Amino acid sequence: MRPILRILAVLIFLGSTAFWVSTGGHTGFSKNRVEIPQIDPITQIEYIEYEERFVMGVEYLALAYGAATICFGLSFAFGRRR
Amino acid sequence: MQTTKCLLLASASLLAGAFSLQAAAKDFDFKDPKGVNNVSFLLDAPLESISGNAKGVRGVVTFDPENPSTVSGTIVIETGSLTATNNQLQEHMLGDGWLDAANHPEITFATKSLSKVETTPDGFTAHVTGDFSLKGVTKELTVPVTFTYLPDMLGARSNGAMEGDLLVMRSTFTINRSEFGIKSGQNTDKVAEEIELRLAIAGAAPGA
């Protein structure tokens, strides 16, 4: 059980970090849509178009790191196999 | 008799002058089928920065290129068109606890007077005083506005479908949510008291 929990902790840590980086490494809260700035060529007005896409925020990263820490901590509750 | 004749002539010329001024003024419609007109908002609190955008803009502004200081009109933003980058945040923002979009579907600004009017190469800048209404509360605000007049540019913008003039208005100003009864003094760590609003809109006067 001990190695399983530790492997799970490492997988959660690496997996969440990789997913966070792959969605842009956004340092704010999660987004359901991404702002794409545009400029109207005639009036020069700047406006935003939205692309519906999930961007993982730091709250999910913190949750994942918390889960990884709990798994790693729990692993100490199980003794080494003799 | 001579005095009466002079008075009549003077009145007639004044009337004619007023009519010609009225005739030169154009109504610019700010309902934008291209979806470019927008008002962006930013709330920068210690724990969270909230930003978004509203595209439900409409209204009519009367503008006379020969006499810009007489500009007047009303701009309306549909509360329900406010968009944030997070669905849950948007739901809360439009809900009855915050903006209550269902019962207060419009945010409006109606001009009352202009001051500090300064001419620029393609328009003018001015401080516009008007009534700003948000969530059922109306306050008088004075905001800096840049007006850009683009004569005969509607054709280029509508791919030749219409001819006419364009009027672009830009303004950045700050309001305090507590002044409009939006959870005064609450959640200030995550939702800033000050809301920065950036307006960039273009109105069209077809056939002008």
Image (cartoon, coloured by chain):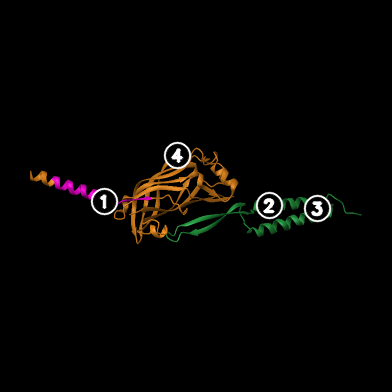
Q: Please check the rendered image and state whether residue B11 is part of the magenta-colored stretch, yes or no.
A: yes
Q: Residues within 10 Å of mark 2 (few under 14, many from 20)?
A: few
SS assignment at label 4: strand
- For label 1, the residue is B21
Position in image of residue A48 (x %, y %): 51, 55
Q: Are marks 3 and 2 on the same chain?
A: yes
Give the residues drawn in magenta, as a range: B7-28
Q: Which mark is residue A62?
A: 2
- Is B143 on the left or on the right of B188, as rendered? left
- For label 4, the residue is B137
Q: Which mark is residue A5?
A: 3
Per the model, the C-alpha gap separating discs 1 and 2 is 64 Å
Q: Are marks 4 and 3 on the same chain?
A: no
Amino acid type, callout 2? Ala
- Chain label for disc 3: A
Point out the image quarter for the C terminus of chain A.
bottom right
Per the model, the C-alpha gap separating discs 1 and 3 is 82 Å
Amino acid type, callout 4? Val
Residue beneath the point at 36% across and 53% down: B205
Position in image of residue B113 (x %, y %): 34, 47
In the rendering, what colour is chain A?
A: green
Q: Residues within 10 Å of mark 3 (few under 14, many from 20)?
A: some
- Chain label for disc 2: A
Q: Please check the rendered image and state whether residue B184 is part of the magenta-colored stretch, yes or no.
A: no
